[in-house]
Image (cartoon, grey):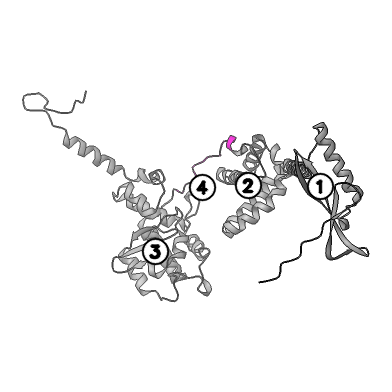
């Protein structure tokens, strides 16, 4: 059996109730370091508590004085009766002071001081393009108005000033709404991290609204001329345009499409990680399927960018082809200008014009709600006429005796 460790010797001091034990190796001066303890009765029971080492400044005299304080507290009922209680009170006092300092710091934290912390997190969570837009919003519009203001002092009227500044500068309501959304996200970030309490001031500001949806769609002749012009400049760009025009793909969905998600047997494209967050499937037209069958398969991406990596944007050749065809000549309204996204818009417009119901168009487009698809409803007036014709056919007509035989009361 292993030998038992010898018990550490407790040595009594001259002062009553004060004792110490020596450190086995450490010195304090030329003598062994001493750890002082006090021994006393509390509620009829012996109690012993340690004060600390001589090397930490504890002496026999200090230990005796502390013991006297405890006995006085026991006698008078005022103060702390044990060292543990005194230490706990000290800990609580220090914690309260720490919280008070943090609250003071939090109360004076400005929007500009919070921005770097928020932006670091945004860079980890969001795309570089989104971060670039948010940084621009902060630098140009947010910081000049509330950058030096403590979060607690930012009020709705400050945000109204941001809206007015952007409107005076000719910025679109959608841009102002995006900027206010950045402000909202920063306040939410502050609340999540315990840096701000209270209501988010953006909740009390009316969101700038406007119909910023694109209205332009191509005729079949315009679309064919554009595809031909693109083919002359870049066959690959023409292929990207064709799949957007015939299948309604967003540019980002074109960039991320992979060969495993192209089903030639069923003629289906599977689009993953879309803007709505859902996976959707879109049938291919014969033209798209023939185009894909002829494309080289180098890597997983169907339409890789330079170096085989995912592309980040549509080539400027698209805009040059549009300009050469004069598709945007004389058009000032950005909603009416032809851009790559116009091809997706044209896809939906053509479907509705051919009588496809809006719910089916919604599913093919991957819209989150039917309201997003309803912008195309004006393109199908014949659908409305056919609906009324169907109702009229279902209503029994007048009989030969001049009486109506109807189960529907039309009065």
Q: Nearer the viewer, mark 2 or mark 1?
A: 1
Mark 1 lies on residue: 39
Which marked residue is nearer to the observer: mark 1 or mark 4? 1
Measure the C-alpha gap from mark 3 to mark 2.
40 Å
Distance Cα–Cα, label 2 vs label 1: 57 Å
The quadrant in which residue 200 appears is top right
Q: Label 2 to label 4, Cα distance in Å?
A: 33 Å
Quadrant the N terminus occupies: bottom right
Q: Which residue is mark 2?
A: 186
**What element does badge 1 sit on?**
strand
- Residue toward you, 336 or 237: 237
Q: Which circle, 2 or 4, is nearer the viewer?
A: 2
Disc 4 is placed on an element classified as loop
Which numbered disc covers residue 242? 3
Q: Find out whether residue 209 is within the magenta segment.
A: yes
Q: Position of residue 185 (x, y in %)?
A: 60, 46
Tell which circle, 2 or 4, labels the residue nearer the N-terminal end: 2
* Distance in Å between CA atoms under marks 3 and 4: 25 Å
Residue 333: which numbered mark, if any? 4
Q: Nearer the viewer, residue 266 or 353?
A: 266
In the image, residue 237 sits, relative to residue 156, either above or below, namely below
Front residue (pair 298, 112): 112
């Amino acid at each position: 059996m292993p030998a038992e460790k010898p018990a550490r010797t407790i040595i009594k001091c001259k002062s009553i109730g004060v004792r110490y034990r020596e450190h086995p190796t450490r010195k304090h001066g030329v003598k062994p370091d001493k750890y002082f303890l006090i021994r006393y009765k509390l509620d009829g029971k012996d109690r012993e508590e340690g004060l600390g080492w001589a090397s930490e400044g504890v002496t026999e005299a200090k230990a005796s004085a502390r013991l006297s304080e405890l006995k006085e507290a026991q006698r008078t009922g005022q103060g702390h009766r044990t060292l543990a209680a005194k230490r706990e009170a000290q800990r609580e006092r220090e914690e309260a002071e720490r919280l008070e300092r943090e609250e003071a710091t939090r109360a004076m934290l400005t929007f500009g001081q919070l921005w770097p912390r928020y932006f670091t997190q945004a860079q980890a969570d969001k795309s570089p393009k989104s971060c670039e837009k948010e940084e621009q919003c902060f630098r140009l519009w947010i910081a000049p108005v509330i950058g030096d203001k403590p979060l607690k002092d930012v009020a709705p009227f400050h945000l109204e000033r941001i809206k007015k500044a952007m409107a005076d500068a000719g910025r679109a309501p959608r841009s102002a709404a995006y900027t206010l959304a950045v402000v909202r996200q920063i306040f939410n970030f502050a609340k999540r991290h315990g840096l701000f309490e209270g209501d988010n001031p953006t909740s009390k500001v009316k969101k700038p609204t406007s119909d910023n949806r694109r209205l332009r769609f191509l005729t079949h002749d315009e679309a064919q001329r554009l595809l031909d012009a693109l083919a002359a400049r870049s066959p690959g760009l023409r292929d990207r345009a064709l799949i957007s025009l015939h299948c309604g793909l967003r540019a980002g969905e074109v960039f991320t499409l992979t060969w495993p998600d192209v089903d030639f047997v069923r003629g289906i494209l599977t689009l993953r990680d879309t803007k709505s967050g859902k996976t959707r499937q879109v049938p291919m037209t014969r033209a798209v399927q023939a185009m894909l069958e002829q494309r080289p398969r180098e890597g997983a991406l169907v339409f890789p960018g330079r170096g085989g990596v995912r592309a980040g944007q549509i080539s400027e050749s698209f805009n040059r082809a549009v300009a050469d065809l004069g598709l945007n000549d004389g058009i000032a309204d950005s909603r009416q200008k032809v851009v790559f996204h116009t091809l997706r818009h044209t896809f939906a417009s053509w479907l509705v014009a051919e009588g496809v119901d809006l719910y089916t168009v919604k599913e093919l487009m991957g819209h989150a709600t039917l309201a997003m698809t309803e912008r195309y409803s004006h393109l199908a007036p014949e659908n409305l006429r056919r609906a009324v014709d169907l109702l009229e056919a279902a209503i029994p007509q007048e009989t030969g005796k001049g009486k109506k035989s109807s189960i529907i009361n039309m009065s």
